[in-house]
Image (cartoon, rainbow, N blue to C red):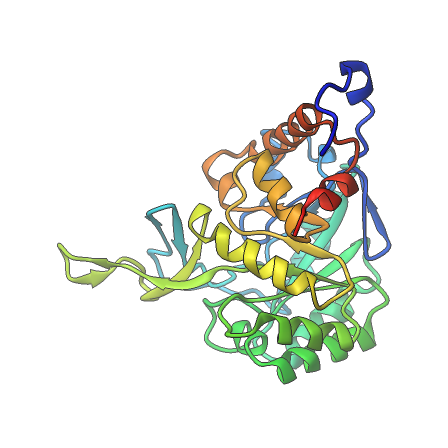
Amino acid sequence: MQDSTLKQSDTENLNLNVTIAGVKWKNPITTASGTFSAKESSAFYDLSKLGAVTTKGVSNVPWTGNPTPRIAETYGGMLNAVGLQNPGVESFITEEIPYIRQYETNLIANVAGHTLEEYCHTVKRLEDTDVDMLEINISCPNVKEGGIGFGTNAKMAAEVTKKVRGITKKPVIIKLTPNVTNISEIAKAVEAEGADAISLINTLLGMRIDVRRAKTVLANRTGGLSGPAIKPIAIRMVYEVRKVVSIPIIGLGGIMNGEDVAEFLMAGANAVAIGTAALIRPTAPIEILEELKNYMREMGYHSIKEIQNAFCD
């Protein structure tokens, strides 16, 4: 139990630093891929305040994404089937990277692909760029080929990891899907093939029907469920994966406030990503960071490590 009577002057010496796969972050907060636009977000807050920013998935060539409507609200969250629309890696290199580099934060590029060759092509193009880390998305439920297809099979997840690991010196984060029966098996497989960190969870496959029109609310029929509704599942999976891997874990799934961050840290995460909350409130990532600081002051924690160690299993 921490000393909740800690003096205010002492609590200002908060150490929020974390190290993920050898890369130092000033705090454990990053953005979740697919929910972050550097130019749009920087209109609301200083990106330099975050430990890292994780970009929307980038592919070897531009992707148009899925037909509309792509997003729908649901109880405790939202469904999306955007389909990883993006302008392609060449535009990412010339437009996105220089813009983000104006800010003093780490840059994580999320890489998408339909095939193993597409993942490799994009990773090779990013190798000589100013990207700090790569997040390999083998978990998107909204593309017909690739994406989740790699993430639901331990052998295929391992193969992607091995190929990517072999062609880049940058830290490799593998983003896992919750749409599996045994996520620990997948996590162990990617760690064995050289993953430097794991992020989990991506969205859960869901569906809604508009009963007035007798049609699905999404043109894609199914989509990825995110938001507070999936947080207990994400916490459980971070907890399970923490038991079987030694590499850092970036936890995400329904984080809406500072205490949600603490819950992920206690479950075994080393850092967290903010997604749906930022779509509701663009300033959510830095608001949640301030809430985390307030939680630490209230509870008497001086560091992220102390929060992690406080969990009594």
Say which of 84 and 185 sits in front: 185
To which quarter of the image does residue 152 belong? bottom right
- Please indicate whether residue 280 sits to the left or right of residue 286 in the image: left
Residue located farthest toward the left when viewing the structure as drawn: 212
Q: What residue is at 62 percent from the left and 80 percent from the top?
A: 154
Q: At which x and y percent is residue 82? A: 44, 59
- Please indicate whether residue 306 sits to the left or right of residue 114 in the image: right
* Above or below: residue 206 compared with residue 263: below
Say which of 240 and 170 sits in front: 240
- Please indicate whether residue 25 sits to the left or right of residue 256 in the image: right
To which quarter of the image does residue 113 belong? bottom right
Q: At which x and y percent is residue 14? A: 79, 28
Say which of 248 and 102 sits in front: 248
Q: At which x and y percent is residue 122? A: 70, 69
To which quarter of the image does residue 308 belong? top right
Q: What residue is at 83 percent from the left and 63 percent from the top?
A: 170
Q: Is residue 9 visible?
A: yes
Q: What residue is at 76 percent from the left and 37 percent from the top?
A: 103
